[in-house]
Image: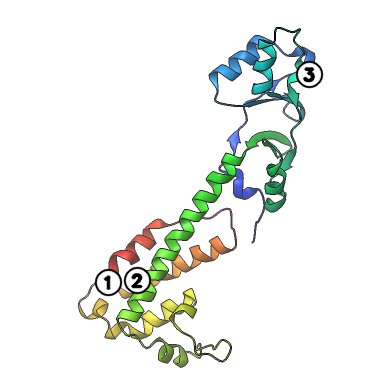
Amino acid sequence: MNLFNNKFLEDFSINLIYYNAEDLIDINLEKVNHIFKTNDISYIPILKRQTECLGVISRKKYFFSLLSNEVFDIKSVIVQMQEISLENPLDKTLLKLKDEPGLLLRIDGKIKKFISPRVVSNAFASYSKKFMMIEKVEFAIRKFIQNNKIDFIKILKEKNLDKKSLNKQKEIDDLFFFDYGIIFNGAWEDLDLYKKKLADKKMFLSSISKIGQIRNDLLHFRYNLEFEKKHIEDILKII
């Protein structure tokens, strides 16, 4: 199932540090000071039973207000912050974040987490790293096929998988990931991997199949991806 929504950010979002209050007049400044001083945060949401946000205290506005020596008014340091849910489309969340310092994430009816540009950056950095590892193993596989002069066109023709694109015969850069398993299976007995017993065929093909599934999960933005780095490392050691 494609889940191009905020579940992609859930594991990277920050557990909310908030002020629990029934009304803005209930705010205790000493407690606000303590929260800001003991936590590396720029905003304190004021939540009523964690289901309603009464506003968000801005650290910058709060401390500038204290330094101004004017009569303190809690409302003057409050900013409004938009809420999102896990089911909201990710692209719309990113657009909202362009003009917002942060977003409040509601889960199961309660405001539980905080989404910031840093959260988004961390999520996409992790995602990109996984994609780059897939790219690395795919490059290594293609290089191996090329260096070992494997006639992959012949093998794919035998399986009726020699698809042409724009009347041009498929080349090595046109191979799909599932082609690799078919190619190695068809050429196995002619390779040093088999002759010198450098790899177990069943385990090798199983790893390629699992890497293909990981790649598929990445392409479909599946949030529940279990990234099995071991399979990639195993293939790279062999080829």
Q: Give the secondary structure at mark 2.
A: helix
Residue neighbourhood size for the residue with mark 3, other residues' Cα within 10 Å, grouped as few (<14), some (14–19), many (≥20) = few
The question of residue 154 being in magenta is answered with no
Identify the disc placed on residue 199: 1
Kindly identify the residue that appears in the image at 47 percent across and 89 percent down. Answer: 159
Q: Amino acid at mark 3?
A: Lys
Q: Nearer the viewer, mark 1 or mark 3?
A: 3
Label 2 near label 3: C-beta < 8 Å?
Answer: no
Q: Quadrant of residue 108?
A: top right
Looking at the rendered image, the quarter that the N terminus falls into is bottom right
Identify the disc placed on residue 75: 3
Kindly report the distance in space between the C-alpha atoms of the residues bearing marks 1 and 3: 68 Å
Q: Quadrant of residue 63?
A: top right
The mark that comes first in sequence, 1 or 2, is 1
Specify the segment rendered in magenta: 221-225
- Give the labeled residue for mark 2: 204
Residue neighbourhood size for the residue with mark 1, other residues' Cα within 10 Å, grouped as few (<14), some (14–19), many (≥20) = some
Q: Give the secondary structure at mark 3.
A: helix
Kindly identify the residue that appears in the image at 53 percent across and 55 percent down. Answer: 225
Kindly identify the residue that appears in the image at 44 percent across and 63 percent down. Answer: 134
Q: Residue 231: percent from the left, percent from the top?
A: 38, 62
Secondary structure mainly formed by the magenta segment: loop
